Image: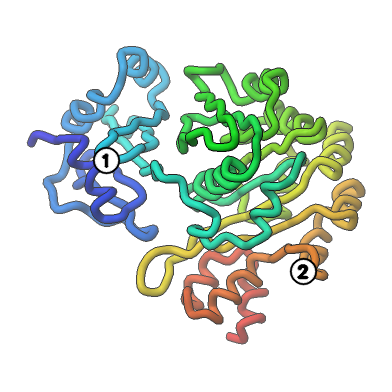
Amino acid sequence: MSLNIKALLKNIVAYKASDLHLVSRSEPQIRIDGGLVPLDMQKLNGQEIEEVCYTLLSDKQKKELEENKEIDFAIEFPDIGRFRANYYYTMNGELAAAFRIIPINIPSLEELNCPSIFKDITKREKGLVLVTGPTGSGKSTTLAAMLNEINKTERRHIITIEDPVEFVHENNKSLFSHRNVGTDTKSFANALKYSLREDPDVILVGEMRDRETISTAITAAETGHLVFGTLHTNSAVQTVNRIVDSFEGPEQVQVRNMLATSLYSVISQSLLPKKGGGRVAIHEILINNSAISNLIRENKLHQIYSQMQLNQSKTGMSTQTQAMVKFLKSSDITKDDAIRFSTQPQELINNIGI
């Protein structure tokens, strides 16, 4: 069977899917509204996948794949779209691949139905803003929309550090410097360290993977920059805990003090199936204030959640449970899905009276 990678990727666009999977002993499968759907094609073998996937790699990338057994990269076809790709090996040394579509036209905050507080966050001069959630929860899209808002309204130098670069922004009012880890810089930590000498106003760190990157991001936020970053955490409180736990002993006291001052917001995002098709973004929103800052400094992190529930009309904060109840009332999501995706299922059940 002769495969054509462009024809396969066109299926993502045609079916409004998010991902394409090529795995041996299976038909090509695409992800629609969170669920995998096999295409009406023959099952693939490892040789067929390798032949079609290698056509997208340079000699340098082929060497990297064969040495490291996996590779991340982005690729764009002008007549189809832009994609983030990951190649990896499975049992018996067979190559597999996952492609995720990246919209070329960057959505606005309004198009994503983001809460109005998101615009307020983009107007900040400095501080650390974290968008968190599991893989596939739309973190990159939300961050792209926030940077797009800055690009439309502010004259700022925005440096993005990603692996790979996903959304490519055209300079509008702002000036973008996109940096790809692996080709334009050796590491997130290295790029972040040197970005402070590149006169940035806003810095996007695609993934805060290690202690050095986290520490430098906090320092950058402390020294007058607006820093956006991501973590694979499921709630605001878990995010703060993860950052603190990345450090040991006396360092935890120091990082809590720095975080209490530099953290501005944590947005924990999840995507739930929408009734009638599509998906709905649920946002838990923490906005740092004097009370939360004190809790972080005094290592009373377990009390942050209850603090988030107070005076929300003034603070702009929301728990995941409250966001889910709102969408349940508008009949956008089902009770079963809400409970399945909830980080506080018992609290949600109590709120909706099951």
Q: Which of 294/251 is in front?
A: 294
Picture coordinates of residue 312 (x, y %)? Answer: 77, 69
Reply above or below: 14 against 313: above
Numbered-mark total? 2
Residue 80 got which mark? 1
- Whether residue 319 is visible here, answered yes or no, is yes
Q: Quadrant of the C terminus?
A: bottom right
Picture coordinates of residue 237 (x, y %)? Answer: 73, 54
Secondary element at image label 1: loop
- Whether residue 248 is visible here, answered yes or no, is no
Reply above or below: 285 against 83: below
Point 25% across, 41% down: residue: 9
Chosen colour scheme: rainbow
Q: Residue 272 vs residue 123: left or right? A: left
Q: Residue 91 vs residue 242: left or right? A: left
Picture coordinates of residue 85 (x, y %)? Answer: 37, 34
Reply above or below: 311 against 19: below
Secondary element at image label 2: helix
Q: Which residue is mark 2?
A: 312
Residue extending farthest left: 1
Point out the tag, 2 or 1, that comes first from the N-terminus: 1
Picture coordinates of residue 53 (x, y %)? Answer: 25, 29
Q: Amino acid at mark 1?
A: Ile
Snapshot quadrant of residue 150? top right
Residue 189 got which mark? none
Q: Amino acid at mark 2?
A: Gln
Point 68% across, 59% down: residue: 117
